[in-house]
Amino acid sequence: IMSILTLENITKTFGTHNAVDNLSLEVPKGSIYGFIGPNGSGKTTTLRMIMNILYPDRGKILLFGEQQIGSCLNRLGYLPEERGLYRKMKVKELISFYGELKHVSKPSKAADYWLEKFDLTKWSEKKVESLSKGMSQKVQFIITIINKPEIIILDEPFSGLDPVNAEIIRNVILEIRNEGSTIVFSTHDMAVAEMMCDYIFMIHRGKKVLDGTLDSIQKSYGQDTIR
C-alpha cells in the first residue's frame, strides 16, 4: 500500500520538554488513521509539523512521496484544535469565501449543499458569532473539507459535539474517505478510534507506543489492556 504521508525520525523540543521524540510513521493512502493519546502526549505538535506550522528539530516529513514543501499544502485540509472563524461574517458567506480560496468550482452551491447536510441552512444569513460552539465547529469542519482535499487532518474533531452532530461528522468522514481522501485524526477516545479507524497510532510523552491496523493491535494486546 502506498504511503501518502511519511514521518521519519521526527523530534520536536520546546526548551527542555521533548514534545515529540524520534517519531516515525507511515499513513497509507485512502486510510483513516487515528492518533490516540492523552492530552499533552504530542498529538497536536505532530499534526502541526505535518501542516508546516511548526518545524521539526530533526527528521523529515514526506507528503505525496516528496519532502514537505509549502506548495502541496493546498492538497491538505486541516481542522485545528483551537477553532477560529471570522466572527462578523455571515455563515454562508464565510463558507463560500473559503470555497473560493480553495478553488471549489461553485462555492455558493457547495456552501448550500453542506449547510443543508449539517442542518444549518436556517443559520446561513446569521453572523458566525451568533452560533453555538457545536454549530461553529460544524462550520469549521465544512470549511476544512469543502474542496475534498487528498489528506484531511482533524485535531479532536468530535470534542464538544453532541452525539447527533458527532454522528453526522463521522458519516461525512467515511463518505469522503470512500471518495479517495486520506483522513488523519486525533482523539483521546479509544471507542471513537475503534469504531472508525483502519490504523491506530498511540503516542505517550512524545514516543510511539503502538502503531498498526486495528486488528493487529487487538490481537497482540487483547481487549483489556488497550482500554
Image: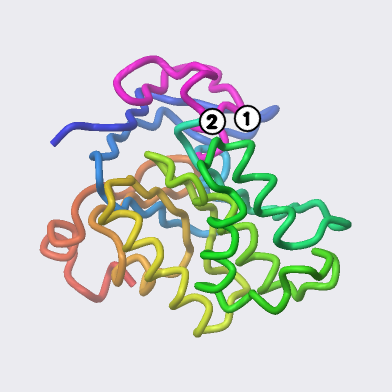
Across and down, in percent, residue 82 comes to 70, 53
For label 2, the crowd category at 10 Å Cα-Cα, with few meaning under 14, some 14 to 19 and many 20 or more, is some
Left or right of 212, for residue 129: right
Left or right of 26, for residue 98: right
Residue located 44% across and 25% down the image: 10
Residue located 51% across and 41% down the image: 105
| Amino acid of disc 1 | Ile
- Dot 2: element: helix
CA gap, disc 2 and disc 1: 6 Å
Question: Label 1 near label 2: C-beta < 8 Å?
Answer: yes
- Looking at the image, can residue 19 be seen? no
In which quadrant is the N terminus drawn?
top left
Residue located 64% across and 75% down the image: 121
Which of these two is toward me, 154 or 16?
154
* Residue 180, above or below 111: above
Which of these two is toward me, 106 or 43?
106
In which quadrant is the C terminus drawn?
bottom left
Across and down, in percent, residue 106 comes to 54, 47
| Amino acid of disc 2 | Met
Q: In the rendering, which numbered label is found on residue 86?
A: none
- Looking at the image, can residue 165 be seen? yes
- Dot 1: element: loop
Residue placed under numbered mark 1 in the picture:
53
Across and down, in percent, residue 115 comes to 59, 68
- Residue 53 is one of the magenta-drawn residues: yes
Residue located 56% across and 57% down the image: 109
Display coloring:
rainbow
- Residue 91 is one of the magenta-drawn residues: no
Magenta part of the chain: 47-73
Which of these two is toward me, 151 or 199?
151
Residue placed under numbered mark 2 in the picture:
49
